[in-house]
Amino acid sequence: MEDDASLSGNPVAHGSVDSTLGWTLPELKPGESTRVHYWTVLGKKYCNVLKIHKRVKEAGRSALFHHNFNFWKSFTEKVSVLPEFASMPQLPQRVSKCFYRSLLAVVSHMDITGSVIASCDSDIKQFGADLYSYCWPRDAAWVCLALDRARYHHLSTEIFEFFSKIITHRGNFLHKYTPAGDFGSTWHPVPMVQIDETGLPLYALYKNWEIAKSVWTTGRYYRGLVIPAANYLTKVIDRETGLPISSFDLWEERKGVHTYSACTVYAGLNGASELSRSLGDYDNANRWKEAAERIKESILEKLYDDKLKRFRRSLDDPTLDSSVFAVWYFGILPPNDPKVVRTMEALESELKRPSGGIARYLHDSYYGYMNSWIICTLWLSQWHSAVGNLDRALELLEWCADNAHPAGLMSEQIDDKGKPLSVLPLAWSHSAYLLAVLEYLQALEIKEGGSCGYQEK
């Protein structure tokens, strides 16, 4: 038995431990050191594992290292085609370093199937000892937005392919999926509808069209993804409120008619309308546009609180929640509209933590009291970039870089002492960082009198 975590050297060992590695090293004198190189080979068949193992041994560690280093260096160099690339040298080194690390981190969470798991963290144990190795359509859509913004369109197309395979016959997406596309475990009554998880993939496909202008991608996923999802969203608009029906929020904690969810449904329908118009399907374009405008009017009429002078979390909940940044980000109002300005200023003043980050919402108690969230901090940075407050936008980008793990990876949360909490890394945190940096650089170039090739709408 190997219960003592000490290997006996037998060909096969039995025990209850998950994993044990051991090496017999030569005797070291005080102050001396040595280095051990090892690799892990994974495969579906034993013979395939042996072939890979043999190839690694024959190539040698130096060749293997340089091969991988050169591949990923070439991969990140594609960023040089961006209009914003000329302004990259103006970024602090730690910010640009986190930008490139975020790009690698996002891609490392992609599976060959096109799924994007939320986190590869094997230490985190959620409900029932479950992990974060699932694909949430919400998180994957944000990754699509970041990859397309960075011009990695071939990778976002793989995610759209995954979306087209997992969409239900009703036209919506479920809570989360395994990388193979099966319905993942959940902690709420099935089917646990989160309406934003259907709106966001539509919006992401629209942004792909807006940047890449690939009629091939749009046409390929129009009938199998756009039409069913957009039709589903039009059917779940409550006739009385003009807003989407009640569903779980993006934090997966409460059910209601939420501002964030309504904004993503608007963005999805508006994007679907533009996609259908680009293909000449004017009947659907007009119908979806009408539905989107109805939601937009209801958001402004019912989700803005005149007494509080800001947007509410939901119809029945006035709690200050950072997710209401969606009002300007998804185009309900421009970022400099007085209602948006008052809302974002309230978020910054009341949700700012002692460490400098931004909490999710007032009195959040998940993993501690009102921890800073990387994505919420970046949403604020994006708004400051959008309204021209570039010093503050950069300050928030630097905060995220300063609170990254020494390896450059970003967690979900940061406590008031700067300790990372929950999963590390979180793909959503890294995709948000990519977007925030590129939007900052775009705003910087505009301020300096230049013009980037891509303009946000």
Image (cartoon, rainbow, N blue to C red):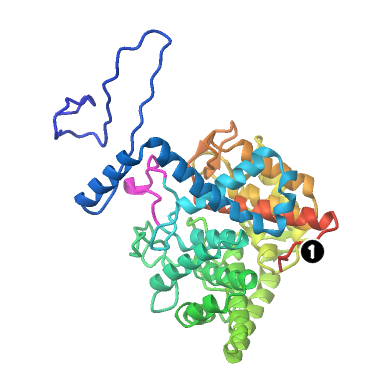
- Residue 322 drawn at (x, y percent): 63, 53
Q: Residue at x 67, y 58 (%)?
A: 82
Specify the farthest residue to the bottom: 283
Q: Which residues are magenta?
A: 121-134
Which picture quadrant has residue 350? top right
- Amino acid of disc 1: Asp
Position of 57 compared to 334: left or right? left
- Residue 69 drawn at (x, y percent): 49, 43
- Residue 147 drawn at (x, y percent): 56, 59
Classed neighbour count for the residue bearing mark 1: other residues with Cα under 10 Å, few (<14), some (14–19), many (≥20): few
Q: Is residue 355 above or below residue 110?
A: above
Which picture quadrant has residue 397? top right
Residue 241 visible here: no
Q: Residue at x 66, y 45 (%)?
A: 351
Main secondary structure of the magenta stretch:
loop
Q: Nearer the viewer, residue 50 or 164?
A: 50
Q: Nearer the viewer, residue 27 or 233?
A: 27
Q: Is residue 145 above or below residue 21?
A: below
Badge 1 is on which residue? 337
- Residue 425 drawn at (x, y percent): 49, 44
Magenta stretch containing residue 127, yes or no? Answer: yes
> Is disc 1 placed on a helix, strand or loop?
loop
Magenta stretch containing residue 359, yes or no? Answer: no
Quadrant of the snapshot with the N terminus:
top left
Q: Nearer the viewer, residue 309 or 225?
A: 225
